[in-house]
């Protein structure tokens, strides 16, 4: 049986809106139309890339319980970052069973089919964080039952390229997905590679009311902003965010180590950390020491510039953030 788009939508996590395409695909978005328009019109040297990145399927997943003997779907993926690779991860009952994608492409298309053992199983399909995703022909064996997976919490994730998911080739291993899983949270990821504290990217009409918010900016501010700019932007960002979500528990991950952090730009690296810390505290956000959660070693980073953690680094990142957040959860 083939699910209609209306039957597919309840299975989606991390998606704030969908668009039916003429070719039968359902396009998935994590930003509102207003936010996408903002990035399209943004006056910035890399505004085109910012606009593309707003289409990436970071933290999007399809999650359900089924007794089907198989499921399959067609996907269409388009580059939405400065990388030319994408992958989908499929987990069944918490175990990775399928990893599919391509390298060296700007557009990808294909079909994923997974055979399932007899009985009822929980399935999670993680979408690529650096490409967009559209889905069609989501099919299960005839007569199968399918139930959406519900989560215990709702989390809003804000940040730059590390938050978006650079450079995880296994999307399930980005820190944002790992953290959402540890917290049993459905999460909306508003990470944009290259972004700084930017109050104007916030949209009160996001339509998502989080219990937990994580914020992780400062690394790009360090290289792009003057002290005055960062102080204003960080404080105004937190002011608006707290006004939008007065009751959410908020956590701020201060910049993690980067190999060039000894350089002096308009700011010193330590200065950017302190500005981010002070702005977080004013908004009632709990600071998390980024320098302590990911080892300050080249081996834990994926890219040549040593900015983005690899999958091992992301696991340290997620564990470090979770260990702080768990102390503030209601059950504690």
Image (tube, grey):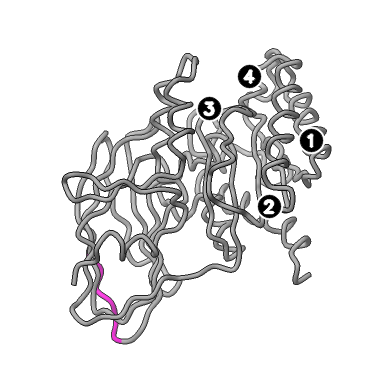
Residue 117 within the segment the image draws in magenta? yes
- The tag on residue 223 is 4
Quarter holding residue 10? bottom left
**Which residue lies under the disc numbered 1?**
277
Lower sequence index among marks 2 and 1 = 1
Residue in the foreground of this view, choosing between 11 and 102: 11
Residue found at x 40% / y 59%: 12
Q: Residue 175 location, x and y as percent?
A: 56, 50
Lower sequence index among marks 3 and 4 = 3
At numbered mark 1, what does the secondary structure look like: helix, strand or loop?
A: helix
Q: Is residue 178 above or below residue 161?
A: below
Label 2 crowding class (10 Å Cα cut-off): few <14, some 14-19, many 20+? many
Q: Residue 8 location, x and y as percent?
A: 32, 62
The residue furthest front is 205
Quarter holding residue 65? bottom left
**Which residue lies under the disc numbered 3?**
194
Marks 4 and 3: in contact by CB < 8 Å? no
Marks 1 and 3: in contact by CB < 8 Å? no
Label 4 crowding class (10 Å Cα cut-off): few <14, some 14-19, many 20+? some
């Amino acid at each position: 049986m083939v699910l209609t788009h209306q039957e597919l939508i309840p299975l989606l996590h991390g998606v704030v809106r969908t668009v039916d395409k003429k070719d039968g695909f359902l396009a998935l978005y994590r930003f509102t139309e207003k936010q996408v328009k903002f990035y399209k019109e943004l006056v910035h040297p890399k505004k085109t890339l910012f606009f593309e990145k707003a289409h990436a399927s970071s933290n999007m997943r399809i999650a359900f319980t089924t007794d089907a003997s198989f499921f399959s779907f067609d996907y269409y993926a388009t580059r939405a970052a400065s990388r030319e690779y994408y992958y989908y991860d499929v987990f069944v009952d918490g175990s990775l069973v399928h990893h599919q994608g391509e390298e060296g492409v700007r557009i990808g298309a294909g079909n994923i089919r997974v055979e399932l053992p007899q009985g009822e199983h929980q399935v999670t399909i993680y979408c690529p964080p650096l490409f967009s995703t559209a889905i069609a022909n989501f099919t299960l064996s005839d007569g199968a039952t399918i139930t959406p997976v519900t989560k215990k919490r709702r989390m809003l994730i804000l940040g730059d390229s590390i938050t978006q998911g650079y450079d995880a080739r296994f999307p399930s291993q980005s820190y944002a997905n790992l953290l959402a899983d540890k917290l049993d949270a459905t999460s909306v990821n508003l990470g944009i590679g290259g972004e700084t504290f930017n109050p104007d990217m916030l949209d009160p009409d996001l339509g998502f009311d989080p219990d937990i918010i994580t914020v992780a900016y400062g690394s790009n501010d360090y290289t792009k902003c003057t002290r005055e700019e960062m102080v204003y932007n960080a404080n105004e960002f937190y002011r608006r965010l707290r006004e939008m979500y007065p009751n959410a528990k908020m956590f701020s991950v201060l910049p993690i180590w980067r190999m060039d952090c000894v350089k002096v730009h308009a700011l010193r690296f330590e200065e950017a950390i302190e500005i981010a810390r002070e702005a977080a505290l004013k908004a009632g956000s709990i600071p998390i020491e980024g320098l302590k959660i990911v080892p300050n070693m080249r081996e834990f980073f994926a890219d040549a510039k040593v900015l983005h953690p690899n999958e091992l680094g992301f696991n340290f990142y997620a564990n470090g953030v979770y260990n702080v957040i768990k102390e503030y959860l209601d059950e504690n």
